[in-house]
Image (cartoon, rainbow, N blue to C red):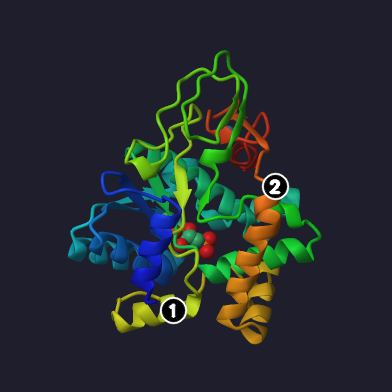
């Protein structure tokens, strides 16, 4: 099956989105998010590009130019969020401070900041879902990394759709639920909308304003995405993020490239979903962050912890 067929199959089987949804695609400028935007637009979805300018020097400038041109050509609106306007600093400064003060290295800080900014802006844009370009290699890598770290259950809930529909919400005063949702509410103040795309109903909107994240390339190996982007002659950069070196993630990726075929990656991910993923859903509690009001595991979210440090 080609990459478009795999996207269609994943979207349908996991109810990732419907045609009337507002679909915000998180665009890094790399081959994965560029390809998924292109495919979803071609399939007739109402797509909108969302890019965070992280201020990674020339690398960010080139990605920004490429995505501006790409979206113009496809007639897709693009919103570029300026990280310095959001948090007062570019990502390199934030990472340097956090490495020194908290010993946080690797891609952790960047991941926390990206998730927070993407959720906030996707909501501002009225998104029903946020699409990311995560592919099969990313997911297999996560399973292996969690295993090697001795924390297999961190991957609980691994699926093309993450978060929203399984969240257990704490705090607030009243609760209300609607049929079909797995959402478990322990208190809370606002109401839930109806659920599941299967019936073409509006999808779950929970009171924490969490925008559902979905990954249409979940079952597509990186090699196939690369081939698609090259065949399509997308005018983009194929280099990895200049910050991602010497990290556990990069080492695991290198090992995977040398030792695993694409079929093996699929077995790792599907096997994990059938066993651990299915046995234990991600039922950790979430609440509103006391500082920013965004969704959080603790009283104060990881993003606010980071920003307070800088
Ligand atoms: P990464 O964490 O860099 O592997 O990226 C994973 C996915 O996150 C990408 O496929 C994009 O969908 C999204 N993403 C990464 N960087 C950005 C960015 N600067 N702006 C918007 N979305 C991004
Ligand atoms: Zn917060």
Query: Residue 131: x percent and y percent?
Result: 41, 54
- Which image quarter is the N terminus in? bottom left
- Choose between 42 and 87: the one closer to the eye: 42
Q: Residues within 10 Å of mark 1 (few under 14, many from 20)?
A: some
Q: Name the residue furthest right.
A: 150
Query: Which residue is at 55% across, 36% downward?
Result: 182
Residue 30 drawn above or below residue 170: below
- Choose between 184 and 113: the one closer to the eye: 184
Query: Which residue is at 62% across, 50% downward?
Result: 157
Q: Give residue 224's mark.
A: 1
- Choose between 86 and 196: the one closer to the eye: 196
Q: Earlier in the sequence, mark 1 or mark 2?
A: 1
Is residue 38 at all visible to an observer of this figure? Answer: yes
Marks 1 and 2 in Cβ contact (< 8 Å): no
In three-dimensional space, the C-alpha distance between marks 1 and 2, rounded to whole angstroms, equals 31 Å
**Quick one: SS at disc 1?**
helix
Q: Quadrant of ligand 2?
A: top right
Q: Name the residue furthest bottom.
A: 258
User: Which residue was labeled with disc 2?
Assistant: 280
**Quick one: SS at disc 2?**
loop
- Choose between 52 and 176: the one closer to the eye: 176
């Amino acid at each position: 099956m080609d990459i478009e067929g795999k996207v269609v199959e994943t979207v349908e089987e996991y109810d990732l989105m419907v045609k009337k949804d507002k679909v915000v695609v998180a665009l890094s400028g790399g081959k994965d998010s560029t390809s998924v935007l292109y495919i979803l637009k071609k399939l007739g979805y109402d797509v909108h590009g969302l890019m965070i300018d992280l201020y990674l020097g020339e690398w960010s400038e080139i990605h920004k130019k490429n995505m501006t041109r790409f979206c113009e050509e496809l007639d897709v609106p693009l919103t570029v969020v300026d990280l310095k306007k959001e948090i007062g600093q570019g990502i390199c400064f934030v990472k340097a401070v956090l490495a020194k003060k908290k010993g946080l290295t690797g891609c952790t800080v960047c991941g926390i900041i990206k998730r927070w900014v993407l959720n906030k802006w996707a909501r501002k844009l009225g998104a029903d879902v946020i699409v990311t370009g995560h592919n099969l290699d990313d997911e297999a890598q996560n399973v292996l990394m969690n295993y090697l770290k001795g924390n297999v259950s961190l991957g609980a809930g691994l699926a093309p759709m993450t978060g929203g529909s399984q969240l257990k919400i704490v705090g607030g005063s009243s609760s209300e639920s609607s049929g079909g949702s797995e959402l478990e509410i322990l208190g809370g103040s606002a109401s839930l909308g109806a659920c599941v795309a299967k019936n073409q109903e509006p999808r779950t909107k929970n009171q924490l304003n969490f925008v559902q994240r979905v990954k249409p390339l979940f079952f597509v190996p990186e090699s196939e995405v690369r081939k698609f982007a090259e065949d399509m002659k997308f005018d983009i950069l194929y280099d990895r993020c200049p910050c991602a070196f010497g990290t556990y993630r990069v080492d695991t990726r290198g090992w995977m490239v040398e030792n695993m075929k694409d079929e093996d990656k699929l077995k790792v991910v599907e096997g994990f979903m059938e066993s651990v993923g299915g046995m234990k859903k991600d039922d950790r509690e979430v609440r509103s962050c006391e500082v920013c009001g965004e969704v959080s595991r603790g009283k104060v979210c990881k993003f606010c912890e980071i920003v307070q440090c800088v």
